[in-house]
Amino acid sequence: MKKIVILLSLLLFTVISVHAEVADINRKGSLRLATENNQEIKNLELKLFKVANAYVDNGYHFQYVDAFKSLNMDVKAIVEKPESYQLLLKDFVAKNNIQPISIKTAENNAILFNDLDFGVYLIVQDKDNKGFEKLKPIIATVPLKENTTWKYDIDLSLKSEKIKVVPKPKIDKLPQTGQNWWPVYIFIIIGTTLVVVGSIGKHYEKKAI
């Protein structure tokens, strides 16, 4: 009897685990980006690029979209260590003039990309946000697996730091060396006047002869 109970328990646990790992392929996802302290980012503009499609079937499977097919790397590597590929993907987008699938400007101190299919996404800031440092590119996967559950609506934290203005160092006026130049200028003027007067005098002497 004990063996039957144990077997039934194991079977029930397996059924629950399998069910928990199945993602709803008909559901859409979203990416919401906001600052940690609800800092104002009303002028921030972000571009969204889809890097790869994601398929959930006994695990995650990925396939590059056409624009990224020439990337010579495994998509899984990007998903597992996104921070190592952020700048590489941003440079790839710029080099190949890839167009974003969406461009959003912040509203209520947040940016929301919604109605997203399963996939791997790249978020890039192109335009400067006056007074703030540029954000690093972000790589996100929809949906996100957390333990045995799938998260479809994902919150991402932005670190939008203000540009630190470094005050210009105060330059003191050069100290006087003790040399007064006004007598020099007076002597130059007197000397020039004497030369001119001398030249005029010689001119009249020649005429008199």
Image: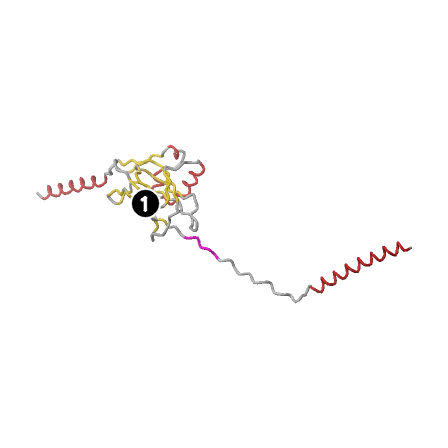
Number of residue marks? 1
Q: In the rendered view, how is the structure colored? A: secondary structure
Q: With 166 as the anchor, is 206 left or right in this view?
A: right
Q: Secondary structure at mark 1?
A: strand
Q: Is residue 94 magenta?
A: no
On the image, numbered disc 1 is attached to which residue? 32
38 shown above or below 152: below
**Along the viewing direction, whichever of 90 and 78 lies nearer the viewer:** 90
**Which region is colored magenta?**
162-166
Q: Is residue 151 left or right of residue 203?
A: left
Residue 140 in picture, x, y percent from top left:
34, 42
At label 1, the amino acid type is Arg
Give the camera-side residue of 56 and 130.
130
Task: From the viewer's side, name the closer residue of 187 and 128.
Answer: 187
Q: Among all residues in the image, which is located at the extreme right?
A: 209
Q: Which residue reaches farthest left?
A: 1
Q: Quadrant of residue 113?
A: top left
Q: Which quadrant of the rendered structure holds the N terminus?
A: top left
Residue 29 percent coordinates (x, y)? 29, 40
Decide if residue 159 is on the left or right side of residue 15.
right
Residue 54: x percent and y percent?
31, 36
**Looking at the magenta stretch, what is its main secondary structure?**
loop
Instruction: Farthest residue to the bottom: give it.
Output: 178
Q: Quadrant of residue 76?
A: top left
Q: Who's the residue at 26% across and 45% down the image?
A: 146
Residue plotted at (76% across, 62% down)? 190
Mark 1 nearby-residue class (10 Å; few <14, some 14–19, many ≥20): some
Give percent across and percent down for residue 137: 39, 44
- Is residue 86 placed above or below 174 in the rendered structure? above
**Quadrant for the C terminus in the image:** bottom right
View extreme (top): residue = 66
- Is 163 inside the magenta-drawn segment? yes
